[in-house]
Image (spheres, helix red, strand yellow):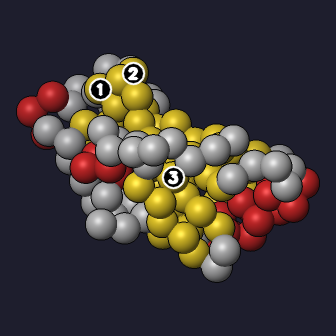
Amino acid sequence: MSIELAPAALERVQSYLTAEPNKTGLRFGVRKTGCSGWGYVIEMADSVAADDVVFEQDGVKVLVDPTSLPLVDGTIIDFIKQGLNEQFVFRNPQVQGECGCGESFTTDPDKAL
């Protein structure tokens, strides 16, 4: 089981933690949404939940709830800048299909639209 931060994402999360030292780390998971089924949730975490799986990289904790973990296991989180736009992007080996608008994904190719 693993979640990895690419260098740009690691740097970005470290900057967030420097700006908000009361935060514990980065919470990463999924929620039901969109036409394919799952959407990513990423936010700075206030604390570690008792059932969180914690991945640590260069002092940065990435917290994943046990329900999300099978759907995001092996994901590499990156951070990209394109012009004025900045965003986290996810290279998730569990993804089998995505909706046309790119807002959601499925791990079951028969459910992708």
What is the residue that sits farthest to the bottom in this orientation?
A: 58
Would you place residue 22 above or below residue 10 in this image? Answer: above
- Mark 3 element type: strand
Identify which residue, 55 or 86, lies in the foreground: 55
Q: Nearer the viewer, residue 43 or 97?
A: 43
Which residue is located at x 41 percent, y 55 percent?
Answer: 53
Q: Is residue 36 above or below residue 98?
A: above
Q: CA distance from mark 1 to mark 3?
A: 21 Å
Report the residue marked by disc 2: 33
Which of discs 3 and 2 lies nearer the camera? The answer is 3
Secondary structure of residue under mark 2: strand
Which amino acid lies under the numbered mark 3 shown in the image of this protein?
Leu
Which quarter of the rendered picture does the N terminus lie within? bottom left
Q: Position of residue 34 (x, y in %)?
A: 38, 21
Residue at position x 76%, y 65% from top?
A: 14
Q: Which residue is mark 1?
A: 37
Q: Mark 3 sits on what residue?
A: 63
Considering only order in the chain, which callout, 2 or 3, is on the residue closer to the N terminus?
A: 2
Q: Earlier in the sequence, mark 1 or mark 3?
A: 1
Density class for disc 3 (Cα within 10 Å; few <14, some 14-19, many ≥20) is: many
Q: Which quadrant of the view contains residue 9?
A: bottom right
Q: Is residue 56 or residue 75 the one in the foreground?
A: 56
Residue at image coords 23%, 26%? 113
Q: CA distance from mark 3 to mark 2?
A: 21 Å
Residue 112 visible in image = yes
> CB atoms at circles 2 and 1 under 8 Å apart?
yes
Q: Quadrant of residue 21?
A: bottom right
